[in-house]
Image (tube, rainbow, N blue to C red):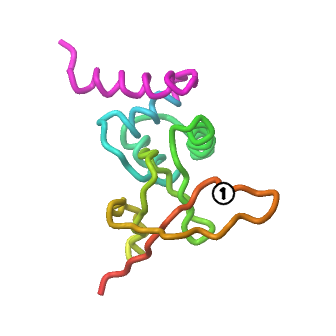
Amino acid sequence: MTDVHTETAMDRGTVWLTGAGLRPTRQRKALADLLVGDGRDRHVTAESLFDAAARAGEKVSLATVYNTLRAFCDAGLLREITVDGSKSYFDTNMSDHPHFYWEDDNRLSDAPAEQLEIARVPDAPEGAEIASVDVVIRLRRS
């Protein structure tokens, strides 16, 4: 007998990949299942996804995880959020929304978009256009 949750999770990862025109290789599929298999949005780093893959018994190198996350971003499946210019988080929620960055535990979470108001954004310099505006609100426990 097949586990309905496992089957749904496996289908969700494949649909996610093929919908973006990506071939569902074994490694892409394994990482996609970890990212979207349960239907919840998440924020991951390459290292946290690598660790999750290892716990799930998947044999993938950290370099493969980095390359796969880059391919997912290029295909429009993930959004990369950079904190401190060096730490990248990958978000499965592709809607425009702000983030909280929890400095105490290096964690990124969604902030309520309906509470954010941006009245004006500076004009882009000549010859450039604004591609996106990322809002990261840094928090520390008081």
Instruction: From the viewer's perspective, tell me whether residue 121 is left or right of residue 118.
Output: right
**Left or right of residue 124: residue 134:** left
Vertical position of residue 21 compared to residue 60: above or below = above
Measuring from the top left, give residue 42's x and y in whole percent.
Answer: 37, 49
- Name the one closer to the observer, 59 or 4: 4
Q: Residue at horizontal 43%, vertical 62%?
A: 98
In this rendered view, identify the residue nearer to me: 51 or 77.
Answer: 77
Residue farthest along the top direction in this orientation: 1
Residue neighbourhood size for the residue with mark 1, other residues' Cα within 10 Å, grouped as few (<14), some (14–19), many (≥20): few
Does residue 140 appear to the left or right of 121 in the view shown?
left
Rendering coords of residue 106 (x, y %): 43, 69
SS state under label 1 = loop
Left or right of 14 in this view: 39: left
- Residue displayed at 42% across by 56% down: 97
Would you say residue 4 sits in the magenta stretch? Answer: yes
Q: Which residue is mark 1?
A: 130
Residue occupying the far bottom of the picture: 142
Q: Nearer the viewer, residue 90 or 58?
A: 90
Q: Please tell me in which quadrant of the rendered image residue 124 appears.
A: bottom right
Residues drawn in magenta: 1-27
Residue at point 41%, 28% (across, down):
13
In which quadrant is the C terminus drawn?
bottom left
Looking at the image, residue 74 lies above or below residue 98: above
Quadrant including the N terminus: top left
Residue 45 in picture, x, y percent from top left: 49, 54
- Please check the rendered image and state whether residue 25 is part of the magenta-colored stretch, yes or no: yes
Residue type beneath disc 1: Ile
Please tell me whether residue 27 is drawn above or below residue 63 in the rendered image. Answer: above
Give the residue drawn at x 45%, y 28%: 16
